[in-house]
Image (cartoon, rainbow, N blue to C red):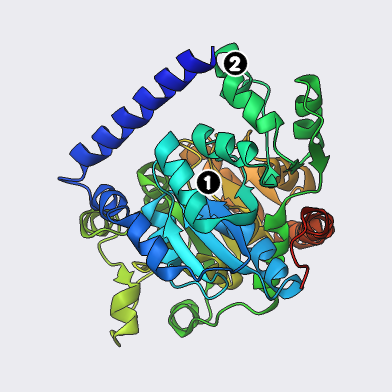
């Protein structure tokens, strides 16, 4: 079974790499994926200093990084002599955070082959590996377990129908079961692990609550947004996709002039910004406002920059979270922490935070324009707007996962023989 799984898995990895190579002709992220891994081992060898104590953190992309960031920074404070090696799978994460000061070394993760996993671990020689959420790379996990390097999953989440629990994936499941600890977000995930024979699960909570709470204590000040909002009420639509943007365009035609919209699209390439200008002909671009172009009477500001959405939400009276008409909603906690009502599309059921916001009455799901209009009208009423304040308290009540995990990591480090200081 192991041989057959490994063969099929390796074929899948090879096909994925081929698909990325073909896509690189036309897509910039695919080109970045390829180029970022060119001469990667030579780069790692040249940058790492021998005889350091390396702690390896791996994040798939931006979302996982934000989930792991509180842990990375808390770990650095607790163990200042340890050198943090941070890897990303996707260009979105690497390109945005390649200069992140919280890590000592930042690289792309090599493609998951047996040879690459061995070579990477030979070079890095981590004392401990921390994988955020659910990056189940078979060869990397196998090699970590073979070398008896303590490895943990943090802020992990599981569903009953997850492919990891399929009989065909049993060799991979075996490697996940061999991890030192799996720190899960919720009780449901913990019980699912128990049902499948895992004894290494531990309920610690979701580190994203800690991250958004930390950001909200000292958010980045954005003069462009302040000037644009002026004395108006503000709807911020974050991480939007085309279906979300069509709904926002309809809504802006219907709501009164006391409202303005800040639209923060998931994709900010020139082609997509041009499409958005068709929906919002009078829209002002963030880059234009930054360069000094007057706001005029434009009711819409399109943010064509990346990296500060979590701070944009501080100016919102109501937030809309994109992605709910596709694979699933983006991070709703970034908005909820500011005590404002949060709206999102129908594909939210896999996200505990969305379920929690609905339970507090500070969040609503919409299915179409009619339900969007209804939800917006409900929350723009000053009395109902106060429901959003419950969101902030709910976020605060769910903080603390980072501290729990750090305490457990200290025990692991002490037991592994690594220097604790």
Viewed as shown, does residue 108 lie left or right of 207? Answer: left
Residue 196 in percent (x, y) is at 75, 20
Judged by depth in the image, the label closer to the viewer, 1 or 2, is 2
Q: How far is mark 1 from mark 2, CA to CA?
A: 42 Å
Occupied quadrant, residue 221: bottom right
Q: Residue at x 52, y 32 (%)?
A: 138
Residue 336 in percent (x, y) is at 67, 59
Q: Note whether 414 is above or below 221 in the view shown.
A: above
Q: Which residue is mark 2?
A: 166
Q: Nearer the viewer, residue 357 or 298?
A: 357
Q: Nearer the viewer, residue 172 or 238?
A: 172
Judging from the image, what secondary structure is the residue with disc 2 in? Answer: loop
Residue 258 in percent (x, y) is at 50, 69
Q: Which residue is mark 1?
A: 373
Judging from the image, what secondary structure is the residue with disc 1 in? Answer: helix
Occupied quadrant, residue 389: bottom right
The answer to whether residue 258 is visible is: no
């Amino acid at each position: 079974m192991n041989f057959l799984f490994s063969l099929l898995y390796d074929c899948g990895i090879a096909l994925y790499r081929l698909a990325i190579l073909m896509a690189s002709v036309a897509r910039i992220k695919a080109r970045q994926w390829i180029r970022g891994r060119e001469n990667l081992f030579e780069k790692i060898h040249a940058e790492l200093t021998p005889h350091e104590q390396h702690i390896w953190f791996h994040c798939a992309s931006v979302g996982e990084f934000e989930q792991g960031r509180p842990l990375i920074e808390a770990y650095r404070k607790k163990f200042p002599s340890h050198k943090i090696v941070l890897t990303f799978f996707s260009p979105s994460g690497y390109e945005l955070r390649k200069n992140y000061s919280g890590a000592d070394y930042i690289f792309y993760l090599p493609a998951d082959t047996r040879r690459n996993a061995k070579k990477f671990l030979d070079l890095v020689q981590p004392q401990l590996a921390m994988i955020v959420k659910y990056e189940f790379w078979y060869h990397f996990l196998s090699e970590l377990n073979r070398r008896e390097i303590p490895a943990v999953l943090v802020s992990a989440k599981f569903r009953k129908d997850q492919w990891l629990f399929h009989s065909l994936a049993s060799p991979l499941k075996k490697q996940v079961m061999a991890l030192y600890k799996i720190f899960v977000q919720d009780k449901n995930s913990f019980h699912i692990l128990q049902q499948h024979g895992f004894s290494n699960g531990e309920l610690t909570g979701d580190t994203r609550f800690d991250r958004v709470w930390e950001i909200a204590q000292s958010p980045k000040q954005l003069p462009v947004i302040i000037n644009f909002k002026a004395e108006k009420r503000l709807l911020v639509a974050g991480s939007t996709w085309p279906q979300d943007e069509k709904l926002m365009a309809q809504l802006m035609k219907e709501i009164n002039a006391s409202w303005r919209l800040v639209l923060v699209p998931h994709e900010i390439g020139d082609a997509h910004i041009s499409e958005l200008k068709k929906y919002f002909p009078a829209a002002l671009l963030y880059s234009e406002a930054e360069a000094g172009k007057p706001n005029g009477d434009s009711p819409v500001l399109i943010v064509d920059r990346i990296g500060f959405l979590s701070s944009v939400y501080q100016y919102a009276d109501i937030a809309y979270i994109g992605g709910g008409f596709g694979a699933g909603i983006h991070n709703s906690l970034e908005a909820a922490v500011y005590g404002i009502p949060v709206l999102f599309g129908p594909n939210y059921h896999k996200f505990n935070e969305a379920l929690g916001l609905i339970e507090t009455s500070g969040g609503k799901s919409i299915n179409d324009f009619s339900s969007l209009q209804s939800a917006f009208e409900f929350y723009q009423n000053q009395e109902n707007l106060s429901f959003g304040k419950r969101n902030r308290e709910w976020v605060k009540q769910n903080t603390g996962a980072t501290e729990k995990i750090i305490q457990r990591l200290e025990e692991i480090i002490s037991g592994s023989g690594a220097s604790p200081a």
